[in-house]
């Protein structure tokens, strides 16, 4: 039952993030990438504050706090910032596809952290890498397309590292504690980079109701809800099984990007996407093992 709930949580998180690419593209037209990431983190911290106080998330050791801070900077400062920069420079559909190489990287990092490496995992990583190279050709003709794909690839790698390290940490620290303190560390680390490009307050005053809804969605649903679901799911499933649910994210993101934003769908994009999906599927399709963390909420 616990594994089924974990699978539902991972599917929910991946679906939310698929829709996030479309919403972020619309909001990024008004608010720069780094300030928008900072705003997302702050909104999530405010929304989750009552649960943080009730759960006394600060009752951990200094060593655990340091580990959570490091993971938070990797996942919330580096990965989210690179993800939004890449999406701003490319497209919602391409952003969803390139970052879908993360599951193959998750399998690789899991192997490096102690899980037995397999030929399947190595082959999967190679397929996903070829897929990223294929999708890169879509936007390399534009001025910032190559930089955008590079940022998205960095987002996928740092996201994979965050996932594997976070999964190991939840064996001794509650999931919510890891989430909240990680968000706090990520927001603090990102603040110096967000302030120089922070928009005038008049910009927020003139935002439409729809854009405000988009910002709240990015902060409350795509961070507070989705990240908890993701961390919870990986706390109760092995890496190679949990990674497969990330495949829902590029499917949702690409379909919405093409249908709602009228973004172009080309053969190159299709070929690259197929390679990425084949690589992540190959990396993820293995029999489930029971995982029982010792400290989860």
Image (tube, rainbow, N blue to C red):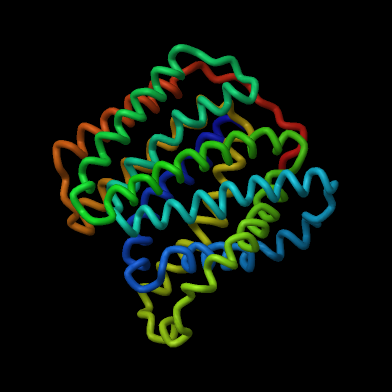
Residue 15, placed above or below residue 36: above
Residue 253, placed above or below residue 108: below
**Res 233 → quadrant:** top right
**Which residue shows up at 63% across the image and 22% down it?**
290
Residue at the top extreme, as displayed: 119
Location of residue 199 in the rendering, given as x and y in whole percent from the top left corner = 45, 78
Quadrant assignment for the N terminus: top right
Residue 145, placed above or below residue 41: above
Quadrant assignment for the C terminus: top right
- Closest to the observer: 167 or 185? 185
Q: Is residue 11 visible?
A: yes
**Which residue shows up at 48% across the image and 31% down it?**
105
Q: Is residue 253 visible?
A: no
Left or right of residue 159: residue 268: left
Location of residue 274 in the rendering, given as x and y in whole percent from the top left corner = 26, 30
Residue at the front extreme, as displayed: 143
**Which residue shows up at 73% across the image and 44% down it?**
67
Location of residue 128 in the rendering, given as x and y in whole percent from the top left corner = 36, 29
- Closest to the observer: 42 or 252? 42
**Which residue shows up at 40% across the image and 42% down it?**
153
């Amino acid at each position: 039952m616990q594994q089924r709930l974990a699978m539902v949580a991972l599917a929910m998180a991946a679906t939310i993030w698929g829709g996030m690419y479309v919403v972020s593209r619309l909001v990024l037209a008004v608010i720069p990438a780094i300030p928008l990431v900072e705003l997302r983190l702050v909104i999530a911290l405010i929304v989750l504050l009552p649960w943080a106080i009730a759960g006394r998330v600060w009752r951990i050791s200094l060593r655990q706090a340091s580990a959570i801070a490091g993971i938070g900077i990797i996942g919330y400062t580096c990965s989210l910032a690179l993800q939004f920069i890449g999406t701003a420079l490319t497209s919602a559909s391409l952003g969803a596809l390139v970052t879908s190489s993360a599951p193959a990287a998750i399998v690789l990092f899991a192997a490096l952290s102690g899980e037995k490496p397999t030929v399947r995992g190595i082959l999967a990583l190679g397929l996903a890498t070829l897929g990223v190279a294929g999708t890169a050709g879509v936007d390399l003709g534009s001025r910032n397309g190559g930089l955008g794909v590079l940022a998205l690839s960095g987002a996928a790698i740092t996201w994979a590292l965050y996932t594997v390290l976070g999964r190991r940490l939840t064996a001794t620290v509650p999931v919510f504690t890891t989430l909240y303190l990680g968000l706090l560390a990520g927001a603090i680390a990102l603040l110096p980079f967000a302030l120089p490009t922070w928009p005038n307050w008049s910009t927020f005053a003139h935002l439409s109701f729809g854009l405000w809804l988009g910002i709240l969605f990015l902060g409350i649903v795509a961070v507070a809800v989705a990240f908890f679901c993701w961390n919870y799911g990986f706390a109760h499933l092995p890496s190679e099984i949990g990674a497969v649910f990330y495949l829902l994210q590029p499917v949702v993101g690409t379909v919405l990007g093409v249908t709602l934003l009228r973004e172009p769908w080309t053969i190159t994009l299709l070929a690259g996407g197929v390679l990425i999906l084949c690589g992540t599927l190959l990396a993820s399709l293995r029999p489930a093992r029971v995982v029982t963390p010792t400290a989860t909420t």
